[in-house]
Image (cartoon, rainbow, N blue to C red):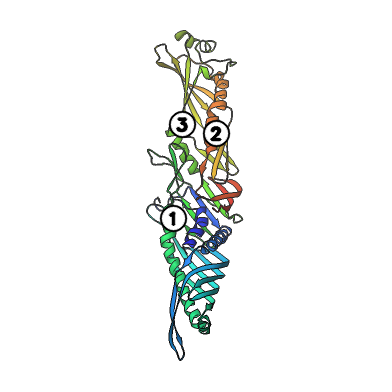
């Protein structure tokens, strides 16, 4: 029965579990929802895996006594038991509100063959199993599971023996079949209880609480509470915070409450709050990933403006007089992390930049001469594939203003063409390369998403998909 613990959870929990819980009441950054369609797919895939696994196991020896009229008591010993055929026809996985899941297997049969002083064949028909799985979470943030109840029933057992004394034992097959049925019914739940604690629970403990994104950023997929079962679905709430691996800082942002649409056509849905993306922005801003510098060798040869004091002479004459024939360097930064705005059907971000201009002195030092403010509107596109969310930014035209100057006032709009060139050809391509790498959804190995759909709602993305389990 260890197969039951390995097969079914690999399908079901792969849809939703990886996982440190936060304070009660904290809103999740990501919610995974498994619908009834997803639960039944998990049950069916688990049944197929269990059926395959059962054919590879060896059963323990079976011994017993029987009463033979006018003779006394006899003893039988069956060994080398193995499951010759197995047919598991029906299974269902249902949420149990406030508890977890209920798994039922019905209309199933197995055929067991083995040896005694000859050979024997056991046909077990009408097998029904019902197990309740209680889902929770522990202090580490990983999920927990226990089998809170189990029952099994077998409708019919038929034993047929061959060998020198097979004819005799076949006369008393009712005694053997009755005992075999009672032992098997009790052993089924015993094996399931043991399997849940020794196979399934340790399996869940291997799930990481964080997933690496790149060389310095991780995403926290810890549970904010135990998995929540309702009448129609199972939901798991994740922290969904992206943080700096080497120095995690407290996040001042709060995840908004997400009002998820009542959709059930696909197996699984992911609601991803803008909190996830905006904590990423905080990390990359802290890392200095949004800073940049522009020097003259980065300007195209046919540009009308060079980053030299000579080129600035027509509109900033004082600069050319104070620093004749010297190069300039523009250093850009984003004073605060830009936040992604979600509105129905639309994603946008309004980054604000400051650019400081420096004269590169012969002494290799830098002299600040003026400061610009740069504003632009950026549209964002997010997509997701079989396992990741990726993105793309499309910037609008920049607007430049002069904020401070040590070399007199001038029309900063004259620099818009130069800055547009750099932003379109260097700055945003760098970000789009990073966004193309994406970040992973909370899926376990061998699970792929297909038939994908994406909706943009206020404050969150809503992703729907069907699931395919890739068997080894």
- The answer to which of marks 1 and 3 sits earlier in the sequence is 1
* Image spot of residue 223 (x, y percent): 44, 52
* Position of residue 399 measured from the top left corner of the image (x, y, whole percent): 55, 25
Q: Earlier in the sequence, mark 1 or mark 2?
A: 1
Q: Nearer the viewer, mark 1 or mark 3?
A: 1
Binning the other alpha carbons within 10 Å of mark 3 as few (below 14), some (14 to 19) or many (20 upward) gives some
Q: CA distance from mark 1 to mark 2?
A: 35 Å
Q: Nearer the viewer, residue 313 or 83?
A: 83
Residue, disc 1: 204
Q: Residue at x 54, y 15 (%)?
A: 306
Q: For residue 422, what is the image quadrant? A: top right
Q: CA distance from mark 2 to mark 3?
A: 13 Å
208 or 108, which lies in front? 108
Q: Residue furthest front?
A: 164
Separation of disc 1 and disc 3 at Cα? 36 Å
Name the residue nearer the viewer: 99 or 70. Answer: 70
Q: Residue tagged by mark 3?
A: 289
Label 2, on which residue? Answer: 432
User: Dot 2: within a 10 Å radius of its alpha carbon, few (fewer than 14), some, or many (20 or more) residues?
Assistant: some
Among all residues in the image, which is located at the extreme bottom?
70
Work out whether 159 lies above or below 312: below
- Front residue (pair 149, 119): 119
């Amino acid at each position: 029965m260890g197969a039951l613990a390995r097969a079914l959870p690999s399908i079901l929990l792969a849809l939703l579990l990886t996982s440190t819980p936060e304070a009660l009441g904290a809103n999740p950054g990501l919610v995974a929802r498994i619908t009834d369609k997803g639960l039944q797919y998990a049950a069916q895939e688990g049944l197929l895996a269990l059926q395959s696994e059962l054919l590879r196991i060896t059963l323990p020896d079976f011994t017993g006594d029987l009463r033979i009229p006018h003779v006394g008591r006899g003893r039988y010993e069956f060994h080398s038991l193995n499951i010759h055929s197995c047919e598991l026809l029906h299974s269902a996985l249902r949420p149990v509100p406030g508890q977890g899941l209920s798994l039922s297997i019905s209309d199933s049969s197995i055929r067991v063959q083995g040896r005694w002083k000859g050979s024997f064949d056991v046909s077990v028909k009408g097998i029904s199993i019902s197990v309740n799985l209680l889902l929770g979470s522990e202090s580490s943030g990983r999920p927990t599971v226990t089998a809170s109840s189990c029952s099994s029933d077998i409708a019919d057992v038929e034993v047929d023996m061959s060998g020198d004394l097979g004819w005799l034992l076949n006369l008393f097959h009712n005694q053997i079949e009755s005992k075999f049925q009672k032992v098997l019914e009790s052993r089924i739940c015993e094996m399931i209880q043991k399997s849940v604690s020794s196979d399934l629970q340790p399996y869940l403990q291997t799930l990481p609480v964080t997933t690496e994104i790149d060389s310095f950023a991780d995403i926290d997929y810890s549970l904010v509470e135990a998995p929540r079962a309702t009448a129609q679905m199972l939901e798991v709430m994740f922290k969904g915070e992206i943080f700096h691996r080497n120095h995690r800082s407290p996040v001042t942002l709060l995840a908004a409450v997400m009002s998820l649409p009542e959709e059930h056509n696909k197996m699984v849905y992911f609601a991803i709050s803008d909190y996830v993306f905006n904590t990423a922005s905080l990390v990359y801003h802290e890392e200095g990933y949004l800073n940049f510098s522009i020097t003259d060798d980065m300007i195209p040869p046919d540009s009308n403006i060079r980053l030299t004091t000579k080129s600035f002479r027509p509109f900033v004459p004082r600069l050319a007089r104070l620093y004749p024939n010297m190069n300039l360097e523009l250093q850009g930064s984003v004073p605060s992390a830009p936040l992604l705005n979600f509105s129905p059907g639309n994603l946008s971000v309004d980054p604000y930049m400051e650019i400081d201009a420096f004269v590169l002195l012969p002494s290799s030092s830098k002299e600040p001469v003026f400061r610009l403010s740069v504003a632009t509107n950026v549209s964002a596109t997010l997509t997701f594939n079989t396992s990741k969310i990726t993105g793309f930014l499309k910037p609008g035209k920049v607007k430049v203003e002069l904020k401070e100057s040590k070399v007199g006032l001038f029309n900063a709009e004259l620099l818009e063409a130069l800055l547009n060139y750099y932003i379109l050809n260097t700055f945003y391509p760098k970000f789009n390369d990073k966004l193309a790498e994406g970040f992973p959804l909370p899926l376990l190995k061998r699970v792929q998403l297909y038939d994908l759909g994406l909706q943009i709602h206020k404050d969150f993305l809503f992703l729907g998909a069907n699931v395919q389990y890739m068997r080894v």
